[in-house]
Amino acid sequence: MSPTADNKLNIFNGIPIRCTVFPRNPTLLPWDSLPASFREVHYVQQSVRASNGSGGLDGMLLGNLAVALNFTAETMDASDGQEYGYRLKNHTFVGSLGDLLQYRTDVSFNVRFMKYYDTHGIEFLHPIYSDQLCILSPKSLEIPQWLAIFLCFHPYVWTSFVVVGFAGGYCWYLLKRWTLRKVSRYRQHLLKGDRAQYTVLSIEMWLVLLGASSTYLPVRMIERTLLVAFLIANVIISGTFQGTLTTAFSTKSYYKDLNTLAALDKSELPIATSSRSLLDIFGNDSLSPLYQSLKGKLQILNESARHRAAFQRDVCCIERHSDVHLIINTEYIRPNGQPMLHVVDECPRVYSLAYIVRKGWPFAPLFNAAIYRFVESGLCMKWYEDTETALILQKRIRQLREQEEEPALRKLTMIDMQTSFYIMGLGMLLSFSVFIVETFVGRGLNCSQL
């Protein structure tokens, strides 16, 4: 900051400013929660010292404002522990919102959404940044190894593969019927396979598509041309099939995640939150049937909605989009690196975020001028990204130390090949059942004929 700007803003002469703060990951973190390497950075130490031990975006902005404006930050938690706060049915306010309206504090220094909070007694300082309000759903589960082989292709692909086999056999059958007319017209001798039935030719075409040898090799050019076309198709289909199966054996696959609000609505999962101020995420008077249905799934929890969504998997939760990457990578990630929560791509709300003061607070213009310079210089986003990177790196390093080193190459085991044995066992069971039926049915028919 230039000397001229410093002289214009540095007018508080160390007077105390009461600031309500409460821990919130990752925008406001206590000093002990910051990574050790991050605490050694000089500008972090200076800002956290000025904010009475608060790090993260909110804490560092408070500390730098205290230094720039030369005031003393007297920080306190929300008096009743309700954090952001809301209005009760008796028209009283709790949390940091109530502390502000009841003159127990001057500024609520936890950034919040710029919207109506059931009172005209507050005003917002200069916006810090804009953010989306998104839904976090439980991450889809891993597909079992025996089922992954069947799900590696879309059902339409399997259907097309079956239809092509039967259609090819029918085409072969029609060509043979046509050649039989020619044979009878010119009194030529019949060849092997000329009297083959449609079912037999369909099986033979399936053998060609699967790369096996056919017992009815055609001798006429028109049938050979058809078979050549299906042999070329066999090279493409079998190569794609084998490559996809190899991928299914060697990698883990997962069920489809919820990526749209419509899919979220069909899942019938309730949307939980511990903050009453987020109950208007789908609007108050929305005319969209989808939003009306989703609004009916909202519920208040007295526990962490994120924790319940990640571990019990029976609810979804609401979170800021900018915080999702950090929260998932530091709190809700499995030892194998897979996340436990998934962000729905469609986010129903976009808000600007800012700090709140009482309406008409005389120092608001000076705070706005200083915050404006911090925001326009890019320092706010730098502080946020530096904190996020430090926390993620700390978590990754801890995971690498605790996790056993896995070999780069993994051997195939019987578990990987279990599907083929299931199919063989099922085929043997069916063939044995048919053998028993034919034995007793054939014996009964012979007895009746005698």
Image (spheres, rainbow, N blue to C red):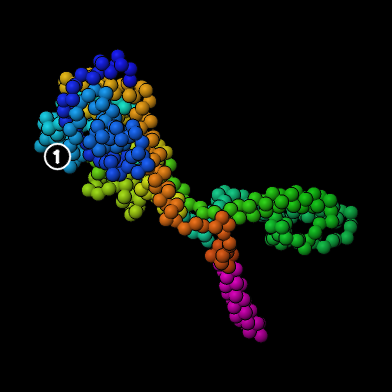
Is residue 105 rendered to the left or right of residue 9? left
Task: Say whether residue 186 is visible.
Answer: yes
- Residue 423 is a magenta residue: yes
Assign the N terminus to one quadrant of the image: top left
Q: Horizontal and vertical percent for residue 281?
A: 30, 36
Q: Secondary structure at mark 1?
A: loop
At 84% across and 61% down in the image, what residue appears? 191
Nearer the observer, 409 or 15? 15
Q: Horizontal and vertical percent for residue 316?
A: 33, 46
Q: Is residue 11 above or below residue 262?
A: above
- Residue 285 is a magenta residue: no
Assign the C terminus to one quadrant of the image: bottom right
Nearer the observer, 136 or 213? 136
Q: Horizontal and vertical percent for residue 86?
A: 18, 36
Amino acid type indicated by mark 1: Ser
At 74% across and 55% down in the image, what residue appears? 173
Residue with the mark numbered 1: 79
* Magenta highlight: main SS: helix
Q: How many marks?
A: 1
Q: Is residue 399 above or below residue 65?
A: below
Residue range of the region highlighted in magenta in the rendering: 422-450
Is residue 137 rendered to the left or right of residue 110? right
Is residue 175 rendered to the left or right of residue 2? right
